[in-house]
Image (spheres, grey):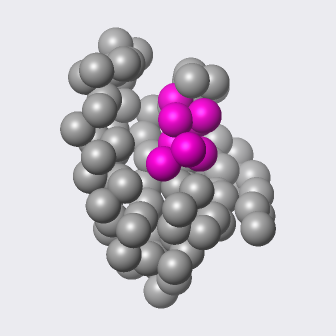
Amino acid sequence: MSEEKNSGRREEFKLDGGKVVDKIKELIHEGNIRRIILKNDEGKVLIEIPLTLGVVGAAFLPVLAAVGAIAALAASMTIVVEKIE
């Protein structure tokens, strides 16, 4: 149920709400992410998360909790990832 689109330095993933937090953890682990944007089915931005190179571990837990709460309310969401080249 994952759909990946590449357009330069952006990637989009369409996921069921329950899989969003796991995908974000995976993306952060990969590194080189500048920003993560979560959109609902209508394309409305629900949350925009700017990331810095130092954001890891416990510092990111409150953000993941917020993402989990938002994802619980949505049947599916789109994650837009801006990568650093």
Q: Quadrant of residue 14?
A: bottom right
Q: Quadrant of the C terminus?
A: top right
- Where does residue 18 sit, x and y in percent of width and height? 53, 62
Foreground residue among 14 and 85: 14
Q: Which residues are magenta?
A: 21-28
Q: Residue at x 38, y 19 (%)?
A: 56
Q: Is residue 71 left or right of residue 26?
A: left
> Looking at this view, is 26 or 46 the one in front?
26
| Residue 9 visible in the shown view | yes
- One can see residue 48 in this view: no
The reply to whether the magenta stretch includes residue 24 is: yes
Q: Is residue 66 left or right of residue 32?
A: left
Q: Residue furthest bottom?
A: 42
Q: Residue at x 25, y 22 (%)?
A: 59
Q: What residue is rendered at 28% in x and 20% in y?
A: 58
Where residue 44 appears, as percent x and y from the top left, is 39, 77
Measured as percent of width and height from the top left, residue 35 is found at 43, 41
Above or below: residue 43 compared with residue 83: below
What residue is at 29 percent from the left and 32 percent from the top? Answer: 61
Q: Position of residue 79 (x, y in %)?
A: 54, 57
Q: Is residue 36 left or right of residue 50?
A: right
For the N terminus, give its image quadrant: bottom right
Query: How many dots with numbers?
Result: 0
Prevalent SS, magenta region: helix
Asked if the magenta segment contains residue 16, the reply would be: no
